[in-house]
Image (cartoon, rainbow, N blue to C red):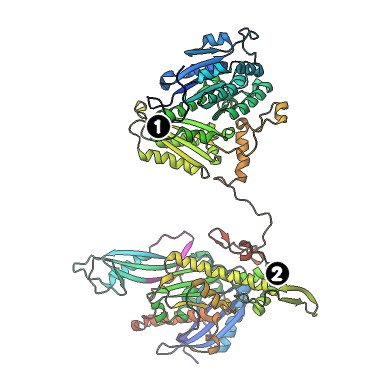
């Protein structure tokens, strides 16, 4: 294809001044996501679909189609078995590598849990890496109702993908499932789920390609999500009109994917990218940033701002919040056997998890703890407490100051 | 024996004691203390009455003693009040001078003072005292009497001390129940500063701290006027209570230990020293570590001073207290409290002595009676004012209003 770039960093771009981005869709789910993308928004990117299922690939809208095939498959796909797909991908490693050659950045779109997505993605990430590109994967995890097997496969694939890719942004479908209307149709549900992921793709895309006034380097982005992806959350919001800064800030703080802002409070690194038309003001930036910073006291905040004349009145904000993963990410045997959400998956258990964490870590709304020992106030037990700047002066000074007498 | 109109009595219902001081004012207006009565107070905690019947009984004892000693009948008293609910703050009143010649008339002064008194208080609070500070004439600071000056805009600062009306009324009703009249209600902090400070010290700037049994009052003067006042509902009782908790002894025992072995500065020698506590038969009950005792006390007293120092720092007064700090109240008898306070405030600290008053020397030298004597002094200044001899009033730069309606 094109000439290979040894240095894939953003700073040595092509003539266009932009990194060359290739968006690869894997499997049926990936195809569907790609189909939902509006190519106009991704001007300059190259699209390709990779699948094992010839029929599905034929129906794909992707301009470049790569069919992974061997005789065993007979054009029927991997049959939902990631191992078969993986073996195939390894066999065709050179094909995958050439598909990635010449790109600075490779976006992988896939749905984990099935055969092609789970099996090919990790190998593709490795191949892209070897071809000299940075790899960013956007994947969905299956719904709970899809069964334990798919769940387990998805988790295993996610682990492998994390090891191979520079960054993984993962969207647990189940989380979306809880947010959408009960009566929405299947088609709609998939559209919404995909839409959320694509918003992420779009956000990262604009981060990379739009001329930034306050530039976010691709290195920043990768640094942010590398090693942390098990716990990352992203949101893409937009608003327009005079009160857009306030609206955007509100939307971020109420975004379902950020657990209504809780994800922000617990993250230790947050990337905020603002994009708007030429009328973007410093006050708007500072208003949004203030809200975000207020929410995430403990996090390192990376901020970028870009102007896109095409956006006119709109203000778009992409937030990626990452939390260093304290626990080793692995699929617990219990989760596997019972089909529960694995411990390492941020997805389904996020809200419960965050509440647990809140108590330990000193995140924003900290609830005061009652002392374990009841401190006697002796003579003043029954009288009105003497409060002075929140301290009860009736309690002996040496106890309040924690001075041990012995 | 005496003409009743010259008899003035001050009453302080304190947490540890109730004291009545009786004085006589001669024709020249000089005050002479002629009687003193006190009794242990059992119905007051943190400066507030919790058992009115008990307080009434104690009050009768103290009154009886004072009347006996002075050989007079006390008909009315000046009542000192305290408590954690009392607050002091500064308020400014403004009044435009409208007369054609721009000369400030006594009416203008009256109006501006009235404006300064019009303040928003919590509904349940009432003003105890308000003390006039300086006037400003067209922004010119430090005017003490603007009458006759020319100006367009007259302002005055007023230090207002207010507290919970019901709690104040409790004390007044209780005194009335003993068929005494209450002449006026005075914040203890104002009273004790009247007793302790000379006008020179007020001019230089001084801080007076009264560490009593249940409360600690403090008043800061500079340029001859009250700049700041406050109450901490912490006092000697807290020291005893801390000791009782820290040394695991009874409250009475802790109180006794405080009086016998207490100090505000822990000594190296006492660090590992122990005391044996014995019961009434002389049998040893328990041993307490003197080092611990001293540290518990020192920490509490140091904290009281630190809280006051912080408050003054916040009010921006620390650099204006050139005459230093004056201590009174029962807890100021604790050995070593002066160096401790000097450490905290980083200025000269003097145990307060009542000045400019004659009479029973036994009463004058005791820091506990500073408030009672101050109440007398307040009363005498007020009565002199009533006699319409304004030249004598200059000693007190205050406009004292009547707090409570007389029935």
Instruction: Magenta stretch: give its range.
Output: B119-132
Instruction: Please provide percent x and percent y for residue A215.
Output: 41, 35
Instruction: Please provide percent x and percent y for residue B393.
Output: 37, 81
Residue B206 in the figure: left or right of residue A140: left
Instruction: Please provide percent x and percent y for residue B356.
Output: 45, 86
Provide the residue designation for mark 1. A275
Picture quadrant of residue A72: top right
* One can see residue B129 in this view: no
Which chain is indicated by disc 2? Answer: B
Rounded to the nearest angstrom, the CA distance separating label 2 from label 1 is: 66 Å
Q: Is residue B375 above or below residue B159?
A: below
Provide the residue designation for mark 2. B247
* In the foreground, A27 or B82: A27
Are the residues at dot 2 and dot 1 in contact (C-beta closer than 8 Å)?
A: no
Which chain is indicated by disc 1? Answer: A
Q: Secondary structure at mark 1?
A: strand
Outermost left residue: B101
* In the foreground, A99 or A160: A99
């Amino acid at each position: 294809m094109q000439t290979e770039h040894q240095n894939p960093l953003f700073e040595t771009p092509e003539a266009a001044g932009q990194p060359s981005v290739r968006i690869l869709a894997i499997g049926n789910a990936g195809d569907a996501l790609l189909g939902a993308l509006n190519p106009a928004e991704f001007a300059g990117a190259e699209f390709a679909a990779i699948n094992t299922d010839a029929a599905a690939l034929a129906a794909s809208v992707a301009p470049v189609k790569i069919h992974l095939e061997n005789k065993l498959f007979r054009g029927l796909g991997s049959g939902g078995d990631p191992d078969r797909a993986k073996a195939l991908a390894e066999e065709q490693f050179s094909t995958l590598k050439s598909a990635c050659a010449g790109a600075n950045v490779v976006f992988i779109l896939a749905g984990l849990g099935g055969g092609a997505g789970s099996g090919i993605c990790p190998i593709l990430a490795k191949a892209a890496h070897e071809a000299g590109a940075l790899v960013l994967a956007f994947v969905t995890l299956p719904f709970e109702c899809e069964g334990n097997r798919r769940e387990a496969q998805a988790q295993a694939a996610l682990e492998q993908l994390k090891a191979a890719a520079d960054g993984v942004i993962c969207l647990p479908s189940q989380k979306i499932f809880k947010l959408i209307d009960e009566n929405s149709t299947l088609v709609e549900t998939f559209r919404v789920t995909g839409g959320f992921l694509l918003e992420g793709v779009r956000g990262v895309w604009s981060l990379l390609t739009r001329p930034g006034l306050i530039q976010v380097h691709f290195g920043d982005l990768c640094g942010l999500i590398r090693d942390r992806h098990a716990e990352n959350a992203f949101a893409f919001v937009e608003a327009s009109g005079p009160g857009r800064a306030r609206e955007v800030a509100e939307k971020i703080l109420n975004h379902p994917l950020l657990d209504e802002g809780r994800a922000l409070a617990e993250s230790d690194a947050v990337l905020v990218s603002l994009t708007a038309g030429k009328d973007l003001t410093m006050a708007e930036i500072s208003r949004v940033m203030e809200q975000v910073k207020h929410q995430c006291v403990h996090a390192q905040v990376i901020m970028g701002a870009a102007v896109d004349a095409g956006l006119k009145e709109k203000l778009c904000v992409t937030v990626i919040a990452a939390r260093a993963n304290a626990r080793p990410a692995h699929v617990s045997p219990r989760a596997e056997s019972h089909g529960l959400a694995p411990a390492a998956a941020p997805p389904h258990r996020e809200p419960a998890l965050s509440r647990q964490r809140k108590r330990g870590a000193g995140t924003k709304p900290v609830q005061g703890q009652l002392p374990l020992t009841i401190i006697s106030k002796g003579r003043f037990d029954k009288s009105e407490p003497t409060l002075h700047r929140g301290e009860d002066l009736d309690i002996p000074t040496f106890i309040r100051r924690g001075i041990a007498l012995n | 024996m005496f003409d009743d109109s010259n008899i003035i009595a001050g009453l302080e219902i304190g947490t540890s004691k109730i004291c009545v001081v009786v004085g006589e004012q001669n024709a020249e207006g000089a005050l002479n203390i002629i009687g003193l009565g006190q009794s242990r107070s059992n119905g007051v905690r943190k400066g507030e009455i919790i058992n009115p019947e008990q307080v009434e009984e104690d009050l009768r004892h103290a009154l009886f003693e004072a009347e006996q000693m002075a050989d007079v009948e006390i008909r009315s008293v000046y009542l000192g009040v305290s408590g954690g609910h009392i607050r002091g703050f500064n308020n400014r009143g403004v009044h435009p001078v409208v007369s054609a010649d721009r000369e400030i008339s006594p009416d203008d002064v009256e109006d501006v003072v009235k404006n300064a008194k019009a303040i928003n208080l919590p509904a349940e609070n009432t003003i105890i005292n308000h003390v006039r500070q300086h006037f400003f004439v067209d922004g010119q600071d430090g005017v003490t009497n603007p009458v006759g000056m020319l100006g367009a805009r007259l302002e005055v600062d007023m230090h207002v001390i207010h507290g919970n009306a019901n709690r104040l009324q409790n004390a007044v009703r209780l005194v009335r129940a003993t068929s005494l009249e209450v002449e006026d209600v005075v914040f203890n902090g104002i009273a004790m500063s009247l007793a302790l400070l000379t006008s020179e010290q007020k001019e230089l700037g001084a801080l007076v701290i009264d560490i009593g049994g249940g409360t600690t009052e403090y008043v800061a003067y500079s340029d001859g006027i009250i700049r700041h006042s406050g109450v901490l509902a912490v006092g000697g009782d807290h020291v005893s209570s801390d000791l009782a908790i820290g040394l695991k002894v009874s409250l009475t025992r802790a109180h006794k230990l405080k009086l016998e072995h207490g100090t505000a500065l822990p000594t190296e020698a006492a660090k590992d020293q122990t005391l044996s506590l014995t019961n009434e038969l002389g049998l040893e009950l328990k041993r307490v570590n003197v080092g611990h005792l001293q540290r518990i006390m020192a920490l509490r007293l140091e904290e009281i001073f630190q809280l006051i120092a912080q408050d003054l720092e916040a009010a921006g007064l620390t650099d204006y207290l050139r005459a230093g700090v004056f201590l009174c109240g029962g807890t100021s008898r604790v050995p070593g409290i002066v160096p401790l306070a000097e450490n905290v405030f980083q200025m000269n600290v003097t145990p307060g002595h009542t000045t400019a008053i004659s009479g029973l020397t036994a009463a004058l030298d005791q820091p506990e009676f500073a408030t009672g004597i101050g109440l007398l002094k307040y009363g005498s200044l007020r009565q002199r004012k009533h006699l319409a001899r304004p030249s004598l009033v200059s000693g007190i730069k205050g406009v004292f209003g009547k707090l409570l309606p007389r029935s």
